[in-house]
Amino acid sequence: MTMSPSPLMNAVLPPARFPTWRDQHYLLIDDTQGMRQLLRESLRGLGARYVDQASSGGEAIAMLAQTRYDVVLCDYHLGKGKNGQQVLEEAKFRELILPTTVWMMVSAEKTTEVVMGTAELHPDAYLLKPITEGVLLSRLHKVWNKKQVFRPIDHAYQQRDFLKAATLCDHQIEHNREHALNLLRMKADLLLKCGRQEEAKEVYERVLATKNFSWAVAGIAKIRLQNGEPEAARHMLTEVINGNRFFMEAYDHLAQAYQTMGQFEEAAAVLERAANLSPNSVVRQRSLGELCLKLGKMATAEKAFRKCLALGEHSVMKNADAYLGLARVCGIKNETEEAMALLTQVQREFSHEHIRLRSKITEGMVHHESGDYLRARKSGDELDSMLRLTPSRPPAAICLDMARLLLAVGVKEASVDLLTELARNNHDNTQLLAEIKQVFEKAKMAAEGNNIISQSCDEAADMMNRGVLLWKTGRLQEAVNWMRTTVKALPNNQRVLFNCAQIIINCIEKHGYDAALAEEARTALLHVEQLNPGQPRFASMMATLNEMAQIHRAMQNA
């Protein structure tokens, strides 16, 4: 039987804005049956009819994957397996919740480490136990009213039509002025997802014209970083942190800015400071470990990798990097047995196509760094054989590590071929070119390396520029044909792939829609996304292709 709202609720909440609690779907996540029962009764007092319960993090994720919940009340400690922070992290990462979903952490945990880690994921509220029914329901009501302004945006968001969702934000601002700031923040985020950087920047500047909000400054800094202005981004992000030392996202972007400028010591210092403030981020601990390993700061690297492994055990962010990094540290410390055990474990737990390559690279480095040069050479020879059988080149970072090992153990020809190919496919990536140069220098091949890098970059630039010149002079079909040839020669060159897609798009705009051409452009863009996910230009050009296809279908159906 449906229960009527309790007298307490009528006393706490404004009747005029009383929501339709009875029709919403609720999920209670707590490993204690008594607490779940207490929360359930509180919701029943509102008239709620659809209340599900989960007693563990794993069970909660399974339920979130099956049902779109309107309200989630989640404890932090959930017994064995995932904790509440990891459940929220995975729900957001896998998009199991929508912008309107109300997520409230209900916990007795109040340590800085836990509260900061959870706060980074932006739950709608963090309520400390013990809580009264009145506190719970009044906070729920307050958050609910705020979240409802996003409801019209939900459908577009689910369809991944982020540009339409951004437009709907404007409509909601007109009718919900009191929530304009939250809507503008969401609009800027959506525009960045679409690759509309300038429009997102305009939104941030509009906000900053009223007040100096940290998130808006950080948003502009992120855009400047993406646009190749790391020093400007560094200056802005430093100001953000000075004004709000708990704005954790700014630390990550600041570290990225320092790395882009080649200031790795400064980047490591920023990440270490952030990890001390909020130590429960798997991604940040991994980044800190990798950077300190490069810098030779073994104590900090080991601490970060071990923390990353502990945090990642039940996290959606768990991957092989921390295992391989810690194995490298163990090799340098001459703890070969633990290093080999980590490599065995990583191959057992991960099945990515490049895991065997990466494990063999790390194995060779461990043997080399521990002074076992015969086994290191054996690993190098095995890696050379594996490389010949690999149908496609792995990502640049793996190729660099392969080249380092092969040069260290005397397999010169394969390593030079790898580095030459890397330079040709990344001719405008100054940071990566600097790393390639360092590999040559460490192998005492500085002069030869400089010649290889210079010649490779010139060849790549000349091929790309010829296609661009044909495009700019209106010879579009010739430009498309030439870019096809260039893509075959430089299949992993992101700039070439982007320009190829752009020229095809312009060809379609001029000569009419061609499904095969559009698919060719889409394939080039998807390859870029595989090589380097999340680039704004990818989102913008994919949106253009999708819009072209929609217009073509509409014209056919007219």
Image (cartoon, helix red, strand yellow):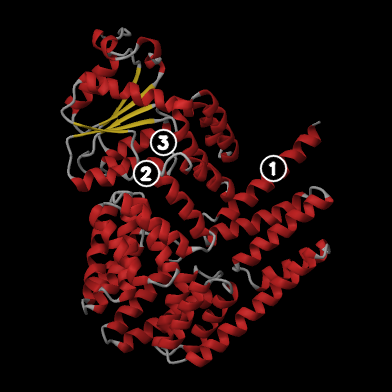
Residue 352: x, y in percent? 44, 61
The residue pinned by badge 3 equals 65
The residue pinned by badge 2 equals 90
Q: Label for residue 547?
A: 1
The 10 Å Cα crowd at callout 1, few under 14, some 14 to 19, many 20 or more, is: few
- Quarter of the picture containing the C terminus is top right
Question: Against 226, is 376 above or below?
Answer: below
Query: Which residue does the image show at 38% across and 34% down from the upper left?
Result: 64
The 10 Å Cα crowd at callout 2, few under 14, some 14 to 19, many 20 or more, is: some
- Of the two numbered discs 2 and 3 in the rendering, the one whose residue sits closer to the viewer: 2
Q: Amino acid at mark 3?
A: Ala
Q: Amino acid at mark 1?
A: Glu
CA distance separating discs 2 and 3 = 10 Å
Choose top left, top right, bottom left or bottom right for residue 429.
bottom right
Query: Which residue does the image show at 73% across and 44% down from the upper left?
Result: 548
As drawn, is 364 to the left or to the right of 224? left
Question: Against 379, is 103 above or below?
Answer: above
Residue 275: x, y in percent? 26, 57
Q: Is residue 385 visible?
A: no
